[in-house]
Amino acid sequence: MCMKKELLKVKDLKQYFPIKGGMLGRTVNHVKAVDGVTFDVYEGETVSIVGESGCGKSTTGRAILRLDEPTSGEVVFDGDDLLSLNKAQMRKKRKDLQIIFQDPYASINPRHTVRQILDEALEIQNVVPKSQRNDKIRELMETVGLGPHQIDRFPHEFSGGQRQRIGIARALSVDPKLIICDEAVSALDVSIQAQVINLLKKLQREFKLTYLFISHDLGVVRHISDRVIVMYLGRIVEIGDKTSVFDNPQHPYTKALLSAIPVPEPGKKKERVILKGDVPSPINPPEGCRFHTRCPFATDLCTTDTPELKAEDYMKEGHLAACHYMDEIESGKHKPKY
Ligand code: SF4
């Protein structure tokens, strides 16, 4: 049992986006981007959410922060029910909950210098008195590995990795408890990616930060995570500590995703599971197990009955997956059809 403090609790979170149609622009259907997601994040850990594009991972992050207003569910952060806060209360709470985007341009004013960008963040949340802001800005630059001579430069004068450091400095400026990293290193070259990940890890130790790390890159996720959540078509299909999920994946979707990661040892080969078809539309997701249209193990039961997240006896504590046939697949009794 984890003795750490639960910092974030997400319960049955749903994010449906309306589709308007007809002459009157009425809601004719919904994109079910996130459809009943439940998980916890403990203080000081890094929980990653992985899955293909369109699985709902980024939407989950945005819904937690209420950047898009969730359709329903519960988000409790540090004891407060975020979905019941009014706008002013939520604005105040955002000090503790920050986000770093893949493209820092999405959140910073490109016509502002780094000093102005950081000063604005410090002013909004009233973190330090005005007289101390310049010192704080210099300290933040140093913390993220940028020099004081770069303070009065504009974002376009920096490389991609340096811009991401500005994004990190901006998030750090308000002394947050949780940072949501939404594909934060995905656009960077591999060597720069490693530098930014190492910086994030260093800052986590230094400032006791908690990360919700959203990424499609399993190599990066393996490096940074304590626990991993795998999402498919708006739902969680597997969750567990990193070692359990990477070394003993239970859901056929997780197995397929992991089979695509190259093996680092020369001469060693891994059997690649090629999934047939594309991810179905989240407007009319498949009945039963949402993965059944692509799963090599699917049976008639899978087309009608939704599997719940559960653990089998042989699985480590906290490791859960949503498949009707986990133990039969594990023991080899249930064979793939292709
Ligand atoms: Fe595949 Fe059925 Fe398991 Fe879903 S429940 S992952 S379709 S075997």
Image (cartoon, helix red, strand yellow):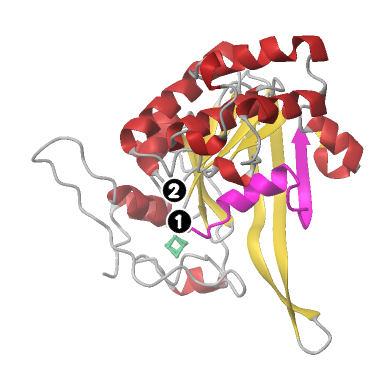
Residue 249 sits in which quadrant?
top left
Residue marked by disc 1: 52
* Residue stretch in magenta: 53-77
Q: Is residue 15 left or right of residue 271?
A: right
Describe the element under mark 1 as helix, strand or loop.
Answer: loop
**Which quarter of the rendered image does ligand 1 occupy?**
bottom left
Q: Would you call the spot at circle 1 few (<14 residues within 10 Å), some (14-19), or many (20 or more)?
A: some
Please check the rendered image and state whether residue 49 is part of the magenta-colored stretch, yes or no: no
Residue marked by disc 2: 216
Q: Residue at x 51, y 73 (%)?
A: 303
| Disc 2 to disc 1: CB gap under 8 Å | yes
Q: Residue at x 52, y 66 (%)?
A: 290
Q: Is residue 277 left or right of residue 30?
A: left
Q: Nearer the viewer, residue 234 or 177?
A: 177
Amino acid type, mark 2: His
Amino acid type, mark 1: Glu
